[in-house]
Image: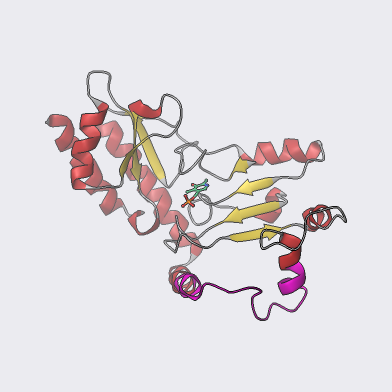
């Protein structure tokens, strides 16, 4: 599985998705892309990339609810999913959902839909349509550039190289002479959207979250000012 933009949950580094998908296609492998951190944050053309299954959600760049997700399935993947020996009769079975909903003309949803999630999704999609997906992506690039420039101006090192960073979150390595736990504690006193890195060795990384409605250079400038003040202390 290749994550569409961020490695792991909200990670700061982009995966080389195009190259991974090309290698997989050359080997006739079916691919599943986790595009939760791509949709609305980076240009993402699932069909052009040739991904078989793409999973996404509205809870990051689209500033929508967290309890709902979307999946796009290629014809090739449907053939595999619909194999006679595949598990069926489950809400987790995509082929059941296909029969009960897609093939039935996309009418009433099967099972008991969660109306609050769907209303929240509709509201988020109204906002997305009003702003335009391209504008949302641009706003994320601008926020990421502001975060990168701000860190560099403070003499800090952005963790991801230029051109391989996520537009949703920017991480920096805490300088060796600074207590990362104490710094994070002070930062979170002003903004809970500072967090520690995820994974091995990540306890020396601090991340700035700038996605959804936070994908705004003004929000990022406030975070950078808070960081400057916390480092001085
Ligand atoms: C955030 C994220 C998820 C999971 O999202 P939740 O909000 O924790 O459900 C999955 N994949 C990627 C790439 C993400 O960035």
Q: Nearer the viewer, residue 116 or 158?
A: 116
Please state the extent of the stretch shown in magenta in the rendering: 98-121
In the displayed structure, does residue 7 sit left or right of residue 226? right
Q: Nearer the viewer, residue 152 or 57?
A: 57
Q: Is residue 79 magenta?
A: no
> Is the C terminus in the top left, top right, bottom left or bottom right quadrant?
top left
Q: What residue lies at 74% left-to-right and 65% top-to-bottom?
A: 96
Q: Position of residue 89 (x, y in %)?
A: 75, 63
Q: Position of residue 170 (x, y in %)?
A: 38, 39
Q: What residue lies at 57% left-to-right and 38% top-to-bottom?
A: 15
Q: Nearer the viewer, residue 171 or 9?
A: 9
Specify the quadrant of the image occupied by residue 152. top left
Judged from this view, the residue extending furthest toward the front is 89
Residue 129 visible in image: yes
Q: What residue lies at 32% left-to-right and 44% top-to-bottom?
A: 146
Residue 154 visible in image: no
Q: What residue lies at 22% left-to-right and 23% top-to-bottom?
A: 178
Which of the colour schemes (rainbow, by chain, secondary structure, one colour) is used? secondary structure
In the displayed structure, does residue 18 sit left or right of residue 117? right
Q: Is residue 161 above or below residue 28?
A: above
Q: Position of residue 175 (x, y in %)?
A: 27, 22
In the displayed structure, does residue 47 sit left or right of residue 208? right
> Is the N terminus in the top left, top right, bottom left or bottom right quadrant?
top right
Q: Nearer the viewer, residue 10 or 109?
A: 109
Q: Position of residue 54 (x, y in %)?
A: 65, 53
Judged from this view, the residue extending furthest toward the top is 177
Q: Is residue 101 magenta?
A: yes
Judged from this view, the residue extending furthest toward the left is 233
């Amino acid at each position: 599985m290749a994550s569409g933009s961020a490695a792991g949950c909200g990670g700061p580094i982009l995966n080389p998705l195009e190259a991974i998908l090309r290698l997989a296609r050359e080997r006739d492998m079916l691919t599943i892309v986790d595009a939760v951190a791509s949709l609305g944050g980076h240009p993402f053309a699932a069909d052009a990339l040739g991904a078989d299954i793409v999973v996404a959600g509205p809870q990051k760049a689209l500033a929508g609810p967290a309890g709902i997700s979307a999946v796009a399935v290629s014809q090739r993947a449907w053939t595999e999913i619909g194999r006679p020996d595949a598990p069926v009769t489950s809400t987790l079975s995509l082929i059941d959902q296909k029969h009960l909903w897609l093939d039935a003309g996309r009418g009433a949803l099967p099972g008991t839909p969660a109306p609050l999630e769907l209303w929240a999704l509709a509201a988020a999609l109204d906002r997305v349509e009003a702003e335009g997906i391209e504008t949302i992506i641009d706003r994320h690039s601008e926020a990421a550039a502001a975060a990168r420039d701000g860190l560099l101006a403070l003499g800090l090192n952005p963790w991801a190289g230029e051109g391989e960073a996520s537009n949703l979150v920017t991480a920096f390595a805490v300088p060796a002479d600074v207590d990362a736990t104490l710094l994070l504690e002070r930062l979170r006193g002003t903004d809970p959207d500072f967090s520690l890195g995820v994974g091995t060795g990540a306890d020396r990384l601090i991340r700035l979250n700038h996605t959804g409605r936070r994908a705004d250079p003004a929000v990022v400038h406030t975070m950078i000012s808070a960081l400057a003040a916390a480092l001085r202390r």
